[in-house]
Amino acid sequence: MNFLNNYLDNYKEHTFAALRIVLGMLFLFHGTQKLLAFPIEFPFPLNPMITAAGVIELVAGTLIMIGFYSRFAAFLASGTMAVAYWIAHGLNSPFPIANGGELSAIYCFSFLFIAANGPGIWSINKR
């Protein structure tokens, strides 16, 4: 097991950067779906709150992906996903597996992790 731990330790920064980039890109696509109907149309009518969430997803996702002001963007995205969880899912059941809110919960805590740790390598700014 020490061999595996030592081997993986060499790639901590790389895997964290890959996580940040992929999460930012996936979040960005939630925004493009809402605002641009790309790659598929959003299945619900847009209201001001969903439109605001789409703008946050588009802008914050882009900033997180490229690593520019990613702490602020990830903190904002984390809060957005916390609100989304409770508004869209949490009132139905407290358990994410029962209320369909797993994705919102994962995004919320993943973005909080990025906000706490900064963008890491492969980013425009390092803080």
Image (cartoon, rainbow, N blue to C red):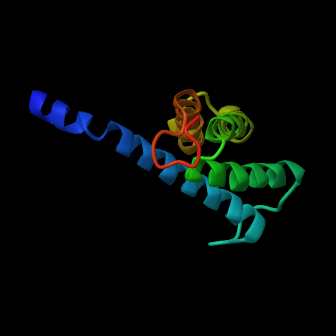
The x and y percentages for residue 66 are: 57, 53
* Apparent side of residue 48 relative to residue 101 in the rendered image (left or right): right
The x and y percentages for residue 61 are: 64, 51
Q: Residue at x 74, y 62 (%)?
A: 34
**Which residue in the rendered view is the most extreme toward the front?**
125
Quadrant where the C terminus sits is top right
Which residue occupies the foreground of this view, 100 or 42? 42
Q: Does residue 52 appear in this view? A: yes
103 versus 40 height, above or below: above
Number of marks drawn? 0
* Apparent side of residue 96 relative to residue 82 in the rendered image (left or right): left
Which residue occupies the foreground of this view, 40 or 14? 14
Q: Residue at x 61, y 53 (%)?
A: 27
Quadrant where the N terminus sits is top left
The x and y percentages for residue 15 are: 36, 44
Q: Residue at x 63, y 35 (%)?
A: 71
Q: Residue at x 62, y 31 (%)?
A: 93
Q: Which quadrant of the view contains residue 81?
A: top right
The x and y percentages for residue 74 are: 63, 38
Q: Does residue 43 appear in this view? A: no
